[in-house]
Image: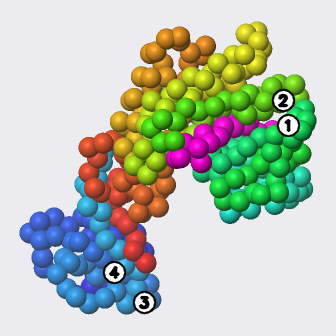
């Protein structure tokens, strides 16, 4: 029999959650169903086979027990920076990067509405970029053969992208290309060549572009098996980039920070440990510390285990947001 006069599906869920072992008519509530018209709540032990009615709102209890939370209001334990709101531009050809008009007024309005914010220019497509600059003669690349495996970032297109960030009050994180084509061809023998990046950095400084931070490589750890790459190679590339930044920006100037390694889902803890050890403990020392560790994670259900992987290797297989007592299923 349903419980009558239940005002909302949240109240129905709460009734299910409050049931104690031994309560009639069964000892535990695993699911609930609420009908708005009848204001009736059905509590279920999970043994039945009847499907929820389309007119009902139904749900289940999370498998994890509720987590007690204590909130201290006397002082701040941590703060986010003012540019915490962030957004991403990926240079992937198949996502239309080469055709985007970054001077579009509607795009500028959208970016400005988030200000102050941070734009990360990075992603899988950035590892297939080549750069040419206003100072390059002849051009270091052309866009005649742009494809999923190659995109030439010319000066005018990057000027428009940087202009969007500058006009909207947005900090820029620039993801430098790891040159994934050559990396996957040379595999464990690959050594990053910073020649093309050096031309870009020199042009950035000449045009007084304010870059908040550089990354180098996007989810390189996910290529460990397919391309036989390792964390030491990515760390060595970061050390080379550090030397380029040091050579391009004099010590007294504000220079871009270094962040990374932007790990993906494949064994990020092991990759990060080797990466940081190689990047920071080998001689000669970095000219500046790695400012932040970056990790890419998706929060869709299929990726929730991956999202936990970097920080909680022993996390249970419960959903990422399992602290919530009730979860609606329709």
Residue occupied by mark 2: 203
Spatial CA distance of label 1 from label 2 is: 7 Å
Upstream in the sequence, badge 2 or badge 3? 3
Using residue 261 as the reference point, say whether residue 165 is left or right of it: right
Q: Is residue 281 above or below residue 117?
A: above
Upstream in the sequence, badge 4 or badge 3? 4
User: Which residue is located at x 35 percent, y 58 percent?
Assistant: 319
Upstream in the sequence, badge 1 or badge 2? 1
Spatial CA distance of label 4 from label 1 is: 62 Å
Pick the front one: 20 or 289: 289
Residue 26 found in image quarter: bottom left
Upstream in the sequence, badge 4 or badge 1? 4
Upstream in the sequence, badge 1 or badge 3? 3
Badge 1: few (under 14), some or many (20 or more) residues near its Cα, within 10 Å?
A: many
Using residue 24 as the reference point, say whether residue 33 is left or right of it: right
Spatial CA distance of label 4 from label 3 is: 11 Å
Element under disc 2: helix
Element under disc 1: loop
Pick the front one: 241 or 269: 241
The span shown in magenta is 164-185
User: Which residue is located at x 47 percent, y 56 percent?
Assistant: 299
Expressed as whole percent of the image width and height from the top left, the position of residue 309 reads 37, 45
Residue occupied by mark 3: 54
User: CB atoms at circles 4 and 3 under 8 Å apart?
Assistant: no
Spatial CA distance of label 2 from label 3 is: 61 Å
Residue occupied by mark 1: 133
Residue 134 found in image quarter: top right
Task: Tell me if residue 212 can be seen.
Answer: no
User: CB atoms at circles 1 and 2 under 8 Å apart?
Assistant: yes
Expressed as whole percent of the image width and height from the top left, the position of residue 310 reads 39, 41
């Amino acid at each position: 029999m349903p419980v009558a006069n239940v005002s909302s599906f949240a109240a129905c869920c709460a009734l299910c959650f409050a049931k104690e072992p031994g309560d009639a008519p069964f000892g535990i509530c695993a699911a609930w169903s609420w009908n708005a018209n009848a204001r009736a709540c059905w509590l279920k032990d999970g043994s039945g086979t009847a499907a929820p009615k389309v007119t009902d709102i139904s749900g289940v209890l999370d498998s994890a027990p509720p987590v007690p939370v204590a909130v201290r209001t006397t002082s701040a334990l941590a703060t986010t920076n003012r540019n915490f709101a962030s957004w991403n531009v990926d240079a992937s050809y198949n996502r239309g990067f080469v055709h985007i008009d970054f001077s579009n007024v509607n795009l500028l309005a959208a970016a400005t509405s988030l200000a102050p914010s941070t734009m990360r220019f990075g992603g899988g497509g950035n590892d297939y970029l080549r750069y040419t600059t206003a100072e390059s003669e002849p051009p270091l690349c052309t866009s005649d053969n742009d494809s999923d495996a190659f995109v030439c970032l010319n000066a005018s297109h990057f000027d428009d992208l940087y202009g969007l960030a500058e006009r909207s009050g947005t900090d820029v994180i620039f993801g430098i290309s790891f040159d994934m084509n050559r990396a996957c061809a040379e595999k464990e023998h690959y050594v990053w060549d910073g020649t093309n990046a050096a031309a870009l950095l020199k042009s950035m400084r000449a045009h007084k572009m304010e870059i908040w931070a550089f990354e180098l490589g996007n989810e390189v750890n996910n290529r460990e098996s397919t391309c036989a790459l390792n964390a030491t190679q990515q760390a060595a590339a970061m050390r080379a980039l550090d030397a380029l930044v040091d050579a391009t920006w004099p010590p007294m100037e504000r220079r871009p920070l270094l962040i990374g390694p932007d790990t993906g889902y494949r064994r990020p803890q092991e990759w990060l440990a080797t990466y940081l050890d190689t990047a920071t403990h080998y001689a000669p020392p970095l000219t500046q510390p790695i400012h932040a560790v970056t990790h890419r994670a998706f929060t869709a259900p299929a990726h929730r285990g991956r999202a936990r992987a970097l920080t909680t290797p022993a996390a249970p297989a419960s959903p990422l947001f399992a602290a919530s007592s009730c979860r609606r299923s329709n």
